[in-house]
Each structure stands twice: as structure tokens, then as C-alpha cells.
Amino acid sequence: MAFSTTATAAELVRAAVDDGSPRALARLISMVEDASPLLREISRLLAPRTGRAEVIGITGAPGVGKSTTTSALVAAFRAAGRRVGVLAVDPSSPFTGGALLGDRVRMTAHATDPDVYIRSLASRGHLGGLSAATPQALRVLDAAGFDVVLIETVGVGQAEVDIAGLADTTLVLLAPGLGDGIQAAKAGILEIADVLVVNKADRPGADETYRDLVAGARNSTRGGDWRPPVIRTVATDTSGVDKLVEAIAEHRAWLVASGELTRRRVRRAADEIERLALAALRARVGDPRRGPVLDDLAARVAAGRLDPWAAADELVAPLAAGGAPRPAPGEPELAR
Amino acid sequence: MAFSTTATAAELVRAAVDDGSPRALARLISMVEDASPLLREISRLLAPRTGRAEVIGITGAPGVGKSTTTSALVAAFRAAGRRVGVLAVDPSSPFTGGALLGDRVRMTAHATDPDVYIRSLASRGHLGGLSAATPQALRVLDAAGFDVVLIETVGVGQAEVDIAGLADTTLVLLAPGLGDGIQAAKAGILEIADVLVVNKADRPGADETYRDLVAGARNSTRGGDWRPPVIRTVATDTSGVDKLVEAIAEHRAWLVASGELTRRRVRRAADEIERLALAALRARVGDPRRGPVLDDLAARVAAGRLDPWAAADELVAPLAAGGAPRPAPGEPELAR
């Protein structure tokens, strides 16, 4: 179904969700990225349709083969007749707005399949990471009827933690020969991984990495009595991908049986609500980054004439006085 | 000077700042990590003493030799008679609270030098990264009269951006042979680096990495007309460290001459004020992560019965009505 360039939120949601229009889908996700003022209404319209997609996070250091693995998983899920959405997030470049991903032609094998939707998301903004746009983009794909949504992100630091909060099942990829430093991060990895993947398992050192992870996985603290299995893959020729798909299905069954699926989803919703609530509060004191008030306070703090806590008090004082300034006309009520 | 275990903020600040007590210093930084209710007063007492330390950020992927380089820089600055503080931040493990660093005996060469203070900082908390504790710990060392403060952090993703916001001069370390993925991150690296370091420059591939960076550095957008120099080091035997110290001094001279030092410090103060202001707002609606209100809203959102924006509205409604709930007794007014 066609929709005009001045389509309302309801028209866009209808086109994307009921008619499966990829153009409408693309437009909705762009609105998420751009923090469109229509997001609030879109979110309301999508809500009753959400909660069905299986959300799989894929993370790991640069060079471990995340995109290749994602592509192999897309093929496997498609072979099982499932519709697949992919969100590729690039949190390592808040400045370039995802240009690193933008130039790549990604996963061309699936480019013409109408039941596969692939999208790169730039992660912008001061409080950065996956936080702002990804949960909303996920919500769009979920409502649009994708059975599986894969979220791929460079896995280090906060992004890893974010993806573990967002996904039902988090895959952490490692590859042999990426330096000892990777092993140093193992403790952190084991706390977010539901399934561990040794990719490039045909390379020297793979057995050692595998044994290391099997030993480490016994101490996983990610969730209840689930112990993350360690799967060996060579994603480039899809070896081991069938075992990976099985491990994902087993984790899914455990999530459902243990009640952990509901707990994770409630936690995910709580995270999103809290983030929006903080954004709303921030909007009420105005965008402090743009105002002369913050500039003046910052200059005084930098010069040692004021401490930052007292400055923060001054910044939020208008709110405490009950005279919350309104957002400037034309601005979305919730700033990202 | 001795101070009791029930020392007031003023006594602690006096012991740490005026008497140079390492125990008082350690206690102050622990109070920062633990978000002590006394922080506000401590911050007020420290403010007039701050703004003198030269802040150097050191970042890079795991395995490039950050700690060895930090140690070599400490030795070089000490040889020049300067007092040096080191904050080692581990943002990749919000869960373990810095255990990865905790077990290591770090930089034992400097352990007995009273003019060197080395501290690992765990980075905890939902909004994570370096954000919460590091600027305050920096403020403590600055006020305590350390001429140089080195902040070392695993450099990927948000942590990198945070350190570039916090430091006067940001060193980005690379090493040859750490995989192609590292190069992929180059665009991001060039936007935060003031000085680029090819460490392990005696290893195969070092010349290529060097040439690559020199070419890339021409397009740096980090700050005005400064083009980041590329320095080759072998930190384990300190080769090239003298050149690195020179490059840092040159960058410092440029910062001062161009007015960029003041701009960076005002921006740093603005970041900190904004973070504290948001924390204050958050405290006013109560800690939503603990309350039954958020639990209930999250369950409704997870079930698709409510959208997250409407849920956020409900969460902040008490504030809009002017009846801001007070923090529970005994809680710090500003939650981290």
C-alpha cells in the first residue's frame, strides 16, 4: 500500500505493520533515529503488537566475525521459514554517526528477500551506547511481525552490557589469535553471555580458546541455573551454525520454562521507561547543553569558584520552584 | 597527621590536601566510589584547590600496553620532579566492580614513592562508563596537588569518548598485529586522539601501522589546527617515551596558546554539572529501579498493555504535580 510523504503516524504504522511495506518500516526507524516528535504516538500504536519477536544479541570484539555469523544465522532462520530483522549498531563511533557501517554493503545475500529486513543504526548522543534508539527500533520490527530480531554490536564496554539488557539471548563471539587482552575481558564476557561462540574454529589456537571458555562457563553468573554452552563455528562456510541455532533454541526453552524470559522483558521495559522518564525530566529543565545558564555555571566550576554539586542545584532550581520551563516551540517534548 | 575513622569531611580534606596523607586520599576516593553522602561537602571544600593538574588520558584496545606506557610516563614525570597521580579505570566490567584490576599488583616500581599515587577505580552503575566516579576522583587528586594525573582506560566505545571529554591531552595507543578490526576503529580513534602512539614498535607490522596513522592523522578533527603526532614506543624498555613526553608538552603548549585548554575544561565542568543535575532529578522522583510503581509499569509495557512513553509520563507525574517526593531518610540526596 502506498503512503504519502506527509503520512500520519497511524498511516505509517498501518503500512509498516499491516501491509509489511519496507519503505514504511524504513521511515519509522529513521524517525526513531531522528527522535521524531511523532515517536510518542507511534509507540502507542505499536504497543499492542509487541512482545512476540525473539531477540538475539550478537556481540564480540572487532574482527571476530560478527557480521558473517549474523548472516549465517539469518540464512538458518529463513530456512526454517521465520521472518528475520537485523539491527546493526555501531556504538564505537558516536561522532561519525555510523559512517563506518554506512559504506559497507551488508549481507547482500539477503538483500532481495522480502522476509529479511537489515538496518544499520547509528548510536548518537551524550549518554550514547545502544541506549536511545535501539529499543525503539526493536519495538518497530517486533510489531511489524519479524519472528526473530538479531541485534549486532561491537562488544566492548557499555555496549556489551546494553545488549545483554536488551536481548532475550546474548551470543558472545570470540576468535582465536586476537591477542591475550581478549582473555582478560573474559570475566566480563561470562557475565553477559547466554551462548559462547568460538568462531574461526579452524584457526590455530581455537582448541585452547574453546577449553578456556568451557572452563570459564562453569562460573557464569548470567542467569539462574543456565550454563552457557560453548559452540565452535566457522561462519564463513557455516560449519557449526546448525549447532548454534540448536543452542539458541535450547536457551529459549530454558528462558520460557524458568520464567526468566518474562523477568528479562520486564527489566528491559523498566530500563526503557526510566530512560524516557529521565529524558522528560531533562527536557523540563530545558536542554542544559545549549543554555547560557550552564555555560556560566561551567565556567565558574572550571575556575574553581563553584563546586559542581552546587552548580547542579542551580541548574535544576527552576524545577524545584515549580516553574518548569516549557520546551521551546517546535521541539519534541522528550529530547533524546 | 592522623585522622580518626569518624573524621568529618573537613578533617579528611585537610589531611589529604594540606598534609598529603595517602590514607586520607584513599578514603576520599573510596567515598567517591561509594557515592558517600559527604561528597557534596567534600566537593565544596575541594573546589578552590582544583584546576591545576595536567590531565592525561591513556586509552587503547586490550593488549596494546597501556599499563606499561603509563608506568614509563610516571617514571619520566617523576624524573622531572613532578608529583603524579594515576587513575586506572575498568569500564569493561561494571559487574565485577573492577576485580580484573584488583588482583593485579600494578606498577610496583612506583609503589614506595610518596609522590606517586596509583588507584584503580571500578566503574559501576547503570549509566556506567567513566561517567560517575572518575571526574570526582580526578578532582580529589587535583586538589591534593598532583601536578599530573594519568587516567588509563580500556579504549573502546563509550569509554574512549568519555576519556576524551575528561582529559586535557588524550593519548591513543595502538600496537601492530592486533587484527584488522583495530584499523576499522581508526576513524573513531582519530576523533579523540591528541597524540597517537604506536607501541611495541619493534614488532612486525609496526611500520605499516605507523604510516597508516600518519596518513590518517592529517584528517583529525579533534581540535582546531592541532594535528596529532604519531610516536613510536617500546614501553617495556622505555624507547620513544622521551619523544612521547615531548609530544605531550607540545600539545600542552598548544592547548594554552589556542585557548582550547579553557574550552575543554569548561566543557568538562558542564558535563559533570549536567550529570549531577540529572542525578538530582532522578532522586526527586525516587529511585525508580526500586519502586513498585516502576515494576508495575514495566510489567504492563512488557505485556503490550502500555507504551513506554506513557509509562514514563506516569513515572514523572508526581513531579509535574509539584509534589516531588523526598529521598528516603538516610539516602544521599544525589543518587549516582
Image (cartoon, coloured by chain):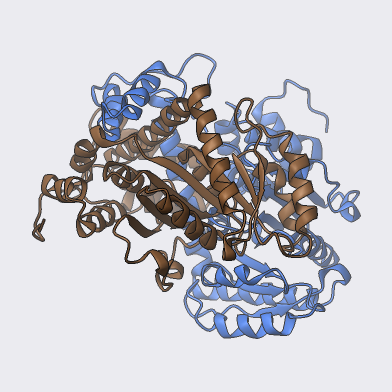
Chain colours: A blue, B brown
Q: x%, y% of residue B55? A: 43, 42
- Work out whether residue A48 or residue A33 is closer to the camera in this orientation and state it: A33
Q: x%, y% of residue B183? A: 74, 52
- Work out whether residue B216 or residue A326 is closer to the camera in this orientation and state it: B216
Q: Residue at x 70, y 49 (%)?
A: B185
Figure check: A126 above or below A83: above
Q: x%, y% of residue B97? A: 40, 64
Quick check: can you spot residue A130? no
Q: x%, y% of residue A272? A: 49, 46
B74 displayed left or right of B251: left
Q: Residue at x 50, y 58 (%)?
A: B72
Q: Quadrant of the N terminus of chain A?
A: top right
Q: Quadrant of residue A140?
A: top right
Residue lying at the far top of the rendered structure: A329
Q: How many marks?
A: 0
Q: Residue at x 43, y 34 (%)?
A: B268
A49 displayed left or right of A87: left
A224 displayed left or right of A48: left
Figure check: A219 above or below A97: below
Quick check: can you spot residue A218? yes
- Work out whether residue A199 or residue A29 is closer to the camera in this orientation and state it: A199
B242 displayed left or right of A250: left
